[in-house]
Image (cartoon, rainbow, N blue to C red):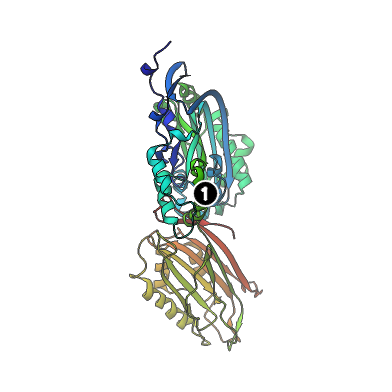
Amino acid sequence: MKNLANLPVMSQANALAQGMNIYGTRDTSSFIKLLVTPSKAPNKTVTFLGKDYQIPSYVNLLENTETYYDAGAYNSREEVQNSLGAHVGISGKYGAFSGEMEADYSQAYHKNSQFDYAYRNFYTQVATLQYQYDPQYLSSEFLSRLSDLPYESDTDNLDIFSEFFNDFGVFFTSKVVLGGTLQFYISVDKQSQTSTNEISAMVKAQYEALFSSGSLDANIKISDAWKRYSTNSNSTLKATGGDPEKISRIVMIDTFEPSKETVEAFHEWVSSIASDPAIIDFSLEGIWQICGDKRQAVQSAWEKYSDIMHPRMTIRTSSQVIEYPIEIEPVTPSIYIGSQSFKPNDTPASPAGFQVLILSGSNISEVIFNKYYAIPPVQYWYLPSLEVWDDFVKDVQGKHDSSNNILILVTFGLDLGMTPSSDAIDVLRSAGAGSGLVKWVKGCSPPSQAPTPSWVSYPAMYSLTGIFGNGPDTGVEYLKYSGWDGVYSDLSLDLSIYFYRQTFSGNYTFGLGEL
């Protein structure tokens, strides 16, 4: 019988019971802290790939060779991140894995509302490790901090729980998979007008051509869908596990040039995995599962804190034909983040204008600036409207436009001709305005205002959510107008935007939600 003390320790066992930052990347670099103390547990002997190791008794090893795929195509960042979370056991809209989103879709990350997304990930496992919970092996640090937590959570003590989550994570690894993985991520410009069903089919065909057949199916290659997809997409290819040289070869291939060489590179990499397996996948459970009689309080605190980490903003506004003289009252925008309303204290002096809301990039409940700007209720509004936009510039530029501050601008009751001044355009572009603003200013502005009974003849709406310092084309814009086709319809907007963080104290980014 072999002496247990002389056997090497299986280091991968320490990937179990790891608290995880679920807002970072979806890999071991997001592990925060081991929640158990391995030395508290007796060791046992296991055999892995023909070699004996010692592992803690709370770890179960199962050698099981299996291959599987995880794939999908999505319309938004929110859908992608929900899918990434669901794969490892995080069900619900928690904004998980923003760091993974940035790593996998780096070329589209800051312009995420302009893209559709897809991925096709291949996994070949050689073994799994599973955590068998036993409270006697939890670390002394974890138990001490757990004992300090209240038995109930509320808004007054949420900071205590948030510090606990920051130090130990909200989820922990209950299972890890050893083997190799090849992951293929694709972003497709929405202007290509390629549906997610088409994208899914194109990604599958491309993947199989690269790593199975060596050539793209002739019918797909001449299809209109492939032409739109291939000329409007960016891709990222990642591999983990196996020989590093073979990994380098496979991730450097041109993903639009399948050949027998790309197939050979794939098979050579797969053949090397058994001799050098890595942690390639895992399953997570909520940390409240191991919090004993504080379980309910911890889970309740997490639900509250997740609303801070991943809040949802809703924007509603409208515009309509307005006759002159003006007899209607202003209908101002509705801006909510969760249940918090953001309305200035005053009432605008006319039914046409815009609201400017500036929030802290690290604390979106902190209002830095919030004001209505009203177009003067005079019959000929063109020059006065430019002065209003210049007033906005004077209020914001050099005072509230610090990098990472979040700008939310929403119009109400505007005519299409009430366009921003040149200085206002510069400020808006610095905070993410792009094609929507260009279309409004250069492509849609009507001729100079002529004497008519209508004060607003061409109802229009524009909304921008952006971050100062990020530059043009990085915000979420919405533009809608009526009247050019002779149909003067009332307009309304109901928009949602999700905010994301990569760390508990980091700055927010955002993505388009429902529209």
Count of numbered circles in the view: 1
Q: In front here: 237 or 227?
A: 237
Question: How many neighbours does mark 1 have within 10 angstroms: few (below 14), some (14-19), or many (20 or more)?
Answer: many
Q: Position of residue 213 (x, y in %)?
A: 57, 28
Q: Position of residue 46 (x, y in %)?
A: 47, 20
Residue for badge 1 = 299
Q: What is the quadrant of the N terminus in the image?
A: top left
Q: Secondary structure at mark 1?
A: helix
Q: Is residue 193 left or right of residue 181?
A: right
Q: What is the quadrant of the C terminus in the image?
A: bottom right
Residue furthest to the bottom: 325
Q: Is residue 10 left or right of residue 319?
A: left
Asked if residue 352 can be seen in this view, the reply is: yes
Residue furthest to the top: 1
Q: Is residue 184 left or right of residue 6?
A: right
Q: Position of residue 259 (x, y in %)?
A: 52, 29
- Residue visible at 52% across and 41% down? 289
- Residue visible at 41% across and 61% down? 363
Q: In front here: 151 or 202?
A: 151
Q: Is residue 235 above or below residue 430?
A: above
Q: In front here: 40 or 377?
A: 40
| Amino acid type of the residue tagged 1 in the rendering | Gln
The picture quadrant where one finds residue 402 is: bottom left
Q: Is residue 489 above or below residue 295?
A: below
Residue furthest to the left: 398
Q: Position of residue 146 (x, y in %)?
A: 43, 45
Asked if residue 224 can be seen in this view, the reply is: no
- Residue visible at 40% across and 37% down? 139
